[in-house]
Image: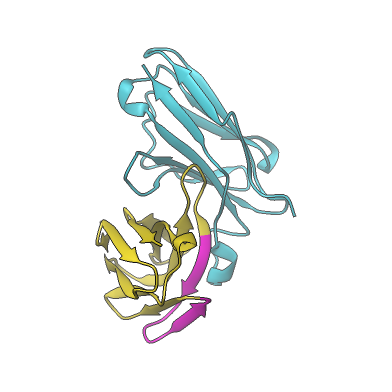
Amino acid sequence: EAGVAQSPRYKIIEKRQSVAFWCNPISGHATLYWYQQILGQGPKLLIQFQNNGVVDDSQLPKDRFSAERLKGVDSTLKIQPAKLEDSAVYLCASSLTGTGVKLAKNIQYFGAGTRLSVL
Amino acid sequence: EDQVTQSPEALRLQEGESSSLNCSYTVSGLRGLFWYRQDPGKGPEFLFTLYSAGEEKEKERLKATLTKKESFLHITAPKPEDSATYLCAVQAGSGGYQKVTFGTGTKLQVIP
């Protein structure tokens, strides 16, 4: 079974530029998550989709970050304009379901991430 | 606000030296706790899910336990390949949406 695919693996940009990340979740997984992981910290949830609807985007800096999940499958996360503090690894994860009572279906499977450096 | 604290931040063990990692949490309506392993340059990899206090799960040299306030990840006779960052995450909340919050992780180094 194919895992969560992310691209690119690395990206270097200058501040005020824009950047986009792409994620393809595991087939059949309804829930997709985008996390920001700063060096030495745990993943911080940016946005969670259930199919193609947003469940939680309370920690997404909406003045510069945007995300979409077209047709409930692939997703893109965009930053425009980027700031120095956006330097981090951006992780995408998917699960069968994110809101169900059965936690086994809430196990998140992660991609390898995109390492963003903003200079 | 849900809080998840892991300790120690870093742990250095000799091969074969057993120890425990701690994950303490303050949440409203715990539904479950997850342990993940993260290797450098990779995304977190699922290890265990614990649902209720008193539950234990084992996998090779790892054993996870859960109480009402914390979880422990016991590592018995570790090997160098166990070196990684171990993350815990809690799922909590009522109603249709239960949020998952990650801790900051414990970086484990096992020396041959």
Query: How many numbered callouts?
Result: 0
Q: Colour of chain A?
A: cyan
Q: Is residue A99 above or below residue B67?
A: above
Residue B56 within the segment the image draws in magenta: yes
The relative height of residue A3 versus residue B2 in the rendered view (above or below) is: above
Q: Tell which of B2 and A85 is nearer to you.
A: A85
The residue closer to the viewer here, B8 or A52, is B8
| Colour scheme employed for the rendering of this structure | by chain
Tell me which corner region of the image, top left, top right, bottom left or bottom right, holds residue B95. Answer: bottom left
Q: Is residue A101 magenta?
A: no
Please report the residue visible at 37 percent of the width from the left and 24 percent of the height from the top: A63
> Is residue B31 visible from the viewing direction of this image?
yes
**Magenta-tinted stretch:** B46-60
- The main secondary structure of the magenta stretch is strand
Q: Give above or below for A64 relative to B33.
A: above
> Residue B94: horizontal and vertical position, in percent?
40, 67
The chain shown in yellow is which? Answer: B
Q: Is residue A83 left or right of residue A30?
A: left
Q: Point out residue A119 in the picture as x, y percentages from the top left corner.
A: 36, 16
Residue B2 in view (yes/no): no
State the residue at coordinates (36%, 31%).
Answer: A61
The extreme front residue here reads B112
- Residue B91: quarter of image: bottom left
Give whichever of B67, B63 is nearer the camera: B63
Q: Position of residue A86 (x, y in %)?
A: 36, 28
In depth, the one of B46 and A82 nearer the eye is B46
